Amino acid sequence: MKVYPYRRLTGNVSWRVDSAQLKAEGEPWEDVETKYVSTVERVVALGPDEERPDWTEARLRLSAGLPAKALDPSGPWQDVKVVAVLAERATNTRTTVEFSSISEDGRERTAELYLHRCDLLDRASLTVHVVATVDGVPGRVIATSDLEWFVDVIEVVPSLARELDVKMVRFGSGASRLQRFKDSPWLVDTTGRIPAVRVNTDFDGLGDLIGVEGGNGPEKTVRELLLAQMCSEVWTAVFHSAVGDLEVEEDGSPVFPHGWQGEVLREMLPDVYPDRDPEVALRAVHTARTGASAAGWGELQSRIHYAAARRAGVPRTLSTTIHDLERLTQGDDA
C-alpha cells in the first residue's frame, strides 16, 4: 500500500465517457454510434470502419461526480480540480483536460477531451484524478478513480480483451529471423502492438494437427494438450515482456503499463501473488526483478510458471488427457 505525506480523499469518484465525435479534414463533427462506445467494457473503439469517415480528430465528452466531503469548506483540501489524462505508451502521448463544474455544489462536472489520430498508434488509457491544494501545496493528487477507460484506434468492436495474432509460417524458408529457429515448433513475438504466435508448419505434422478441427480420440487429446502448452508459454512470455520495462514514480513505485502489457499483468498478478492487491503484487515483482537478490527473481519464476499454466488451463487439460489415455488403453486391452 502506498503511503502519502498528506490526507487523501476516500470515497467513490465516479466518471464515464458519455459520447464521442469524429471529424475528418475539412468536414463537420459526426457522432460516433453507441455500438462503438461500450460502458460495460469501458472501451471507445475508433478503428477503421467503412461506416464512418477517415477521421483526423476525435472529441470525447466526459462526466464525473465527486463525493460531498471533497468540497467541504472545513476539509483539508482547497481549490479542488478534476482532470482526465489520456496516455499511450506506444507514442508516449499524454493529453490532459480539466473538468468544469455544472452543478451548484460543484460535485457534478463535465469535460471535452480532444485527440488527434496522428498522435495515437494503438490503444490509449484514460484515467481521472482529483487534485487539490493540501497544506499550502498545490497540485497534489488526492484521489484517482478505480475506473479506467481505453481509446482503441485499431479495433472496431469495443472489447477489453484482445485475441492473439496466430499465424502458420514456414520457418525454414521464411524470414531470416525465423530460419534460425527452424527446429522450434512455435515462437512467441512480443515486439508488436499485440503478442503474436508463429506456428512452424515445417515442423513435421504440427500444422495438420493444430489446424484441423475434430479428429479421432488420440489426435484430439494430443492437440488440446499441445495448445494448452503453447498458451502457457505465451502467457509466460508476455508476462516477462510486460514487466521488462516498467515505468516508476518518484518514490520507486512501478506503474501499470498501458495497452496489452497492463492487461496481461492485471490478469496474471492475482495468480502470481493471490494474497496481495495488484499494486502491491506489481511492486513485489518489480523488486524481485531489479533487486540484488537472485533468489527473489528465481523464486518468482515458479509463481509465474504456475500463473501461466493456470491461465492456459494446463492442469485441467492434462488431467483430461490422462483420463482419456487410460480409457484408450483399457479399450485396446479389451
Image (cartoon, grey):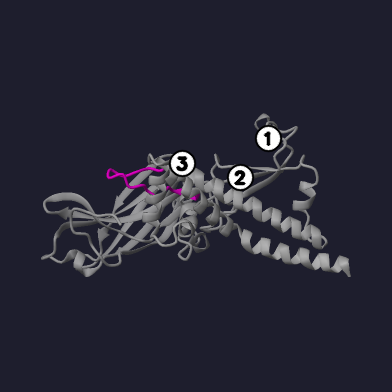
> The C terminus appears in which quarter of the rendering?
bottom right
Q: Where is residue 170? Give x, y as percent.
A: 74, 38
Q: Where is residue 203? Give x, y as percent.
A: 76, 41
Residue in the image at 70% along x and 32% along y: 179
> The N terminus appears in which quarter of the rendering?
bottom left
Disc 3 target residue: 244
Disc 2 target residue: 196
Disc 1 target residue: 181
Mark 1 or 2 closer to N-term? 1
Please name the amino acid that badge 3 sits on.
Answer: Gly
Q: Classify 10 Å Cα crowding around label 1: few (below 14), some (14-19), many (20 and above).
A: some
- In the image, 105 versus 237, the foreground residue is 237
Q: Residue furthest right?
A: 334
Mark 3 or 2 closer to N-term? 2
Please name the amino acid that badge 1 sits on.
Answer: Phe
Q: Secondary structure at mark 1?
A: loop
Q: Nearer the viewer, mark 3 or mark 2?
A: 3
Q: CA distance from mark 1 to mark 2?
A: 16 Å
Q: CA distance from mark 3 to mark 1?
A: 23 Å
Q: Which residues are magenta?
A: 246-261
Residue in the image at 66% along x and 48% along y: 166
